[in-house]
């Protein structure tokens, strides 16, 4: 296929931004989203002329269709928008839980729904949803995060069935050592996590970008969840 247009929801920082840069470096066009239009425009400008931005907060799903109305044909969609939340059962914050559930499960689904008439109905078209290893490796305070990431896995399966021949897959990152969140941790914090991988190293943002591109392009993969964590927790 010639030049493609890929939409990356949640791409003004971190892994989403690295993916957007890589898409443009490959010669394709990218549409990134962020909550603030001016900030998203500045990020798009830094990526290059093949990038443009749309202001979008997918925790407010009623506004999604209108925000995405100016987008033309789409050949790939990556739903990378996430929020981190520590919310225990003993100290349960309903408002925070509701926002996170809405963002990932309702928001992700509504983005697909809103763009469906512009997603090329072909197995060359890939949709990638971001989950996370907390779905099967919970930690104190991960009540909401673990639940919704498990929900992402179920969502992938039903979307892959409903939207075929469009392919839908999920990526579940582990601890990404060079991501802004983890790289900012005090020295030594990551050592314990590294010791739980067979090679003694953590996955990188480049690993996630590469895996996401594989899921976008490989026409033999649909309805699948993959882990990118360098074998974390095997040792």
Image: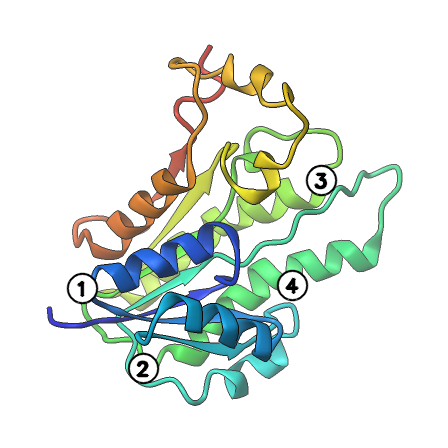
Q: Classify mark 3: helix, strand or loop.
A: helix
**Distance between the alpha carbons at the discs numbered 1 and 3:** 36 Å
**Distance between the alpha carbons at the discs numbered 2 and 4:** 23 Å
**Distance between the alpha carbons at the discs numbered 2 and 3:** 35 Å
Q: Which mark is residue 102?
A: 4
Question: Disc 2 designates what residue?
Answer: 118
What's the residue at 28%, 64% (across, down)?
24
User: Which badge, 2 or 4, is on the more N-terminal residue?
Assistant: 4
Assign the N terminus to one quadrant of the image. Answer: bottom left
What's the residue at 52%, 35% (across, down)?
133
User: Which badge, 2 or 1, is on the more N-terminal residue?
Assistant: 2
| Place of residue 211 in the rendered image (x, y in percent of width and height, measured from the top left) | 31, 43
The residue lying toward the viewer, choosing from 54 and 172, is 54
Can residue 53 be seen here? The reply is: yes
Q: Residue furthest right?
A: 91
In the displayed structure image, the side of residue 22 where residue 17 appears, left or right: right
Can residue 167 be seen here? The reply is: no
Q: Is residue 161 above or below residue 231?
A: below
Q: Are marks 4 and 3 in contact (CB under 8 Å)?
A: no
Question: Disc 1 designates what residue?
Answer: 124
Disc 3 crowd rating (10 Å Cα; few below 14, some 14-19, many 20+) is some
**Distance between the alpha carbons at the discs numbered 2 and 1:** 14 Å
Disc 1 crowd rating (10 Å Cα; few below 14, some 14-19, many 20+) is some
What's the residue at 51%, 51% (across, down)?
14
| Place of residue 151 in the rendered image (x, y in percent of width and height, measured from the top left) | 54, 49
Q: Which mark is residue 185?
A: none
Q: Which mark is residue 143?
A: 3
**Distance between the alpha carbons at the discs numbered 4 and 1:** 29 Å
């Amino acid at each position: 296929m010639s030049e493609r247009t890929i939409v990356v929801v949640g791409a003004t920082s971190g892994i989403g931004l690295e993916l957007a840069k890589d898409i443009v470096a490959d010669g394709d066009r990218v549409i990134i989203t962020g909550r603030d239009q001016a900030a998203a425009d500045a990020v798009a400008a830094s990526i290059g002329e093949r990038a443009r931005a749309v202001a979008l907060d997918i925790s407010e799903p009623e506004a999604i269709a209108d925000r995405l109305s100016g987008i033309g044909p789409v050949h790939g969609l990556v739903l990378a928008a996430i929020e981190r939340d520590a919310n225990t059962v003993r100290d349960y914050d309903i408002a925070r839980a509701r926002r996170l559930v809405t963002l990932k499960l309702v928001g992700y689904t509504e983005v697909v729904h809103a763009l469906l008439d512009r997603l090329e109905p072909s197995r060359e078209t890939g949709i990638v949803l971001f989950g996370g290893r907390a779905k099967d490796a919970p930690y104190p305070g991960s009540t909401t995060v673990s639940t919704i990431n498990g929900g992402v896995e179920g969502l992938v399966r039903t979307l892959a069935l409903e939207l075929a021949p469009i392919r839908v897959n999920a990526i579940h990152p582990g601890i990404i050592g060079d991501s802004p969140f983890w790289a900012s941790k005090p020295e030594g914090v990551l050592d314990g996590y590294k010791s739980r991988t067979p090679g003694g190293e953590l996955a990188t943002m480049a690993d996630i970008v590469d895996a996401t591109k594989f899921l976008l392009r490989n026409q033999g993969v649909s309805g699948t969840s993959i882990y990118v964590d360098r074998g974390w927790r095997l040792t």
